Amino acid sequence: MPENNIVMHIDMDSFFASVEIRDRPDLKDKPVAVCSKTYSLEKDAPRGVLSAASYPARKFGLHSAMPLSEALKLCPDVILLPMNRDFYKQVSENIIKIIGKHTKTVQQVSIDEAYALFLDNVKTYDDAKAAAQLIKNEIFAAERVTCSVGIAPNKSVAKIASGFQKPDGMTIVLPDQLLSFLSPLFVTKLPGVGQKTNEFFDLYNIKTVGDLAKTDKRFLFEKLGKQGLIFSDMANGLDESPVIETADVKSISRFYSLSPFTADPKALSLGCHAVCEEVHKLLSDKKMFYKTITVSLRFYDFSTVSKSKTHSVHTSDVSTLKRYAEELLLELTDANTEHKKARQISVGVSKLKKTDANQMQLSDFF
């Protein structure tokens, strides 16, 4: 019989660091960390916070949210890279688009993770495994980064499962395996159990998910309120929260990698036009107008500059997009007095709105 309500959770592996490393083969197998804030090593007083750490860096105990000063004590040779959120966002958008091709519902919950429901032709867990592997393969082929997947009857178990065989893993929990899968786990593996909640559980000797599953619900409600009941349900393999399609996007962007790196205006212009075509196609697919255009240049040393311009009205015209993007590109290249070579150019649009039947042509605006 068909096995209904199969949920998939996709979690990118050390996403920020992986995206950086893919374009720099020299960093492969080295401890790399991305800093979420501007960092300084002046006067032996490093400042900043790690946003991501590669798997080699994690072997030294480095992890996200760790102060830079502490990270350098644990791993003095760690290679530090500045945060480039716009770049990661572009890759994330590409990945979500791939997931959406093979599923009927995608709920993106952060830049590097999403839940999804499979297409109606996926009726068994074997079907789900094959579909998930196809998604994993396509993501790697397109973006050269890996992800780990959890497949289960509900969201909370799928999320736990996706972290089981990192990196590049896949863990499937069948309906009759829920309790045997959950019970031995430390209670901190449950989504939403933070430090304070874990201190409470520790106080009452609730160490494992199995311990929590056997704890009286009334006691949990008295101590933790409604959240205590939610934790109890999760510990017993119960989670009725739905997978909800992500709300309309707020921006669309694409990038073009330049190989070899170049400062040649003609090469940059060609890349700019190519990216504009991609962005326009996505706008057409989503039936959306844009108002603001942003162009970014990422140089060989990974420094990034950006400029934006806002149109007077919403439009969907590719010629306008190209013209504005060219103007912004020229401003960026004129400001590049060091004549640094660029490794990537990106074009994005924002302040989006949906079209309607009476607003399908640019000519309506001029």
Image (cartoon, grey):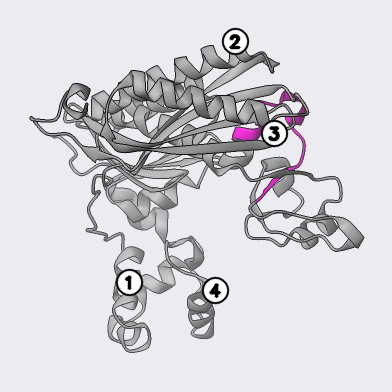
Q: Is residue 29 magenta?
A: yes
Q: What is the residue that sits farthest to the front in this orientation? A: 366
Observer-nearest of 167 and 146: 146
Q: Earlier in the sequence, mark 4 or mark 3?
A: 4
The circle drawn on residue 302 is 3
Q: How crowded is mark 4: few (under 14 residues within 10 Å), some or many (20 or more)?
A: few
Q: Which of marks 3 and 1 is nearer the N terminus?
A: 1
Q: Quadrant of residue 319?
A: top left
Callout in the foreground (2, 1): 2
Circle 4 is placed at which residue position? 195
Quadrant the C terminus occupies: top left
Circle 2 is placed at which residue position? 266
Q: Separation of disc 4 and disc 3 at Cα?
A: 36 Å
Q: Is residue 209 magenta?
A: no
Callout in the foreground (2, 4): 2
* Residues shaded magenta: 19-35
Q: Which of marks 3 and 2 is nearer the N terminus?
A: 2
Instruction: Tell me which amino acid carries mark 2.
Output: Lys
